[in-house]
Amino acid sequence: MNVVTYDSFENSTVATERLIGKHANNSLQQDYIAMVTHDLRTPLTNVRGFLELIAMGVYKDNPKLLKEQAQQAERNIDRLMRLIGDLLCAEKLLDGRLNLNASWIDAHDLANCSLEQFKFVAQRAGIQMSSQVSTDRIFADKDRLMQVLINLISNSIVATPKNGVISLNIHKTDEHFVLEVVDSGKGIPSTMLSKIFERFEQSDCATNESESGFGLGLAISKALVEAHGGTICVSSAQNFGSKFKVKLPVQNKA
Ligand SMILES: Nc1ncnc2c1ncn2[C@@H]1O[C@H](COP(=O)(O)OP(=O)(O)OP(=O)(O)O)[C@@H](O)[C@H]1O
Ligand SMILES: [Mg+2]
């Protein structure tokens, strides 16, 4: 098994330059606009088409189809709102406008709240979820740290086949709180590892566009972890799985 590791901290200058490079580099800025426009336009076009069909009376005698397509339109609007939320969050992080609201949080509580969100999705996908959490308290912004864990776990769910396992581990060392999301999924190609924390980098695209992500989750997660003074790194072996490790500095505030 060939495990490859990428540490975002060691490469953070390059990655940050690439992230903010959109302001300095015209072609990157054009790519950025093209991708955002595409992601905004696709769900809007679908919803517009649906409204046109309603106005034409196409669903008059077919309430079942109307219901199905209304639900599809709802999913498109949700996707649009999620993209706008993610873009706003990314921009705020880049501008340093995101204020953290840190307090002491219970590691068990953090793990339970994060895993809770995936109970049904994991069950449906036949994935087993587990956790190993120490009894420590972590000094962090709970909502933002949950956002990081939820991003990592949702990626693992997408990458992990039926009968796979995902584990959330939290423990404390002398210097760090360490949070790990480990999966037995398809892994990440070594050529992709150094890029996945950049916006819009995806190793593959889901076949159904309305189900696919935007390539923002890890960029946002990295920025949120760095806003806490921490680092995030990944190691992965193709077809064996991936491990994302977040390290936050221990702050002696008690
Ligand atoms: N645990 C994982 N296993 C395999 N590939 C992964 C894993 N986590 C991330 N990736 C790869 O990294 C890419 C970038 O992840 P990221 O979370 O930034 O974007 P996304 O999940 O595609 O979209 P978004 O999170 O914005 O909905 C993913 O598209 C996927 O190719
Ligand atoms: Mg994601």
Image (cartoon, rainbow, N blue to C red):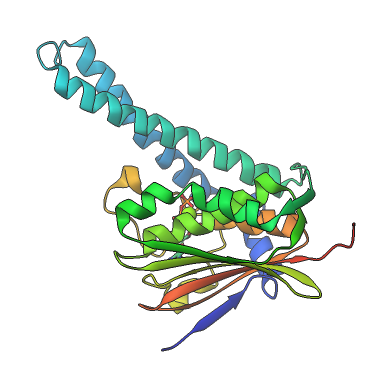
Residue at the farthest left position: 61
Relative to 67, residue 123 above or below: below
The total number of labels drawn is 0
Left or right: 16 with respect to 155? right
Residue at the farthest front position: 135
Q: Residue at x 32, y 28 (%)?
A: 73
Residue 78 location (% of width, % of height):
42, 33
Q: Nearer the viewer, residue 155 or 52?
A: 155
Residue at the farthest right position: 253
Q: Is residue 28 visible?
A: no
Residue 26 location (% of width, % of height):
58, 52
Left or right: 127 with respect to 118? left
Q: Is residue 153 visible?
A: yes
Relative to 92, residue 154 above or below: below
The quarter of the image holding the N terminus is: bottom left
Residue 51 location (% of width, % of height):
28, 17
The quarter of the image holding the C terminus is: bottom right
Q: Residue at x 73, y 48 (%)?
A: 141
Left or right: 156 with respect to 89? left
Q: Residue at x 57, y 48 (%)?
A: 113
Residue 178 location (% of width, % of height):
68, 69
Q: Nearer the viewer, residue 208 or 175?
A: 175
Q: Residue at x 70, y 63 (%)?
A: 135
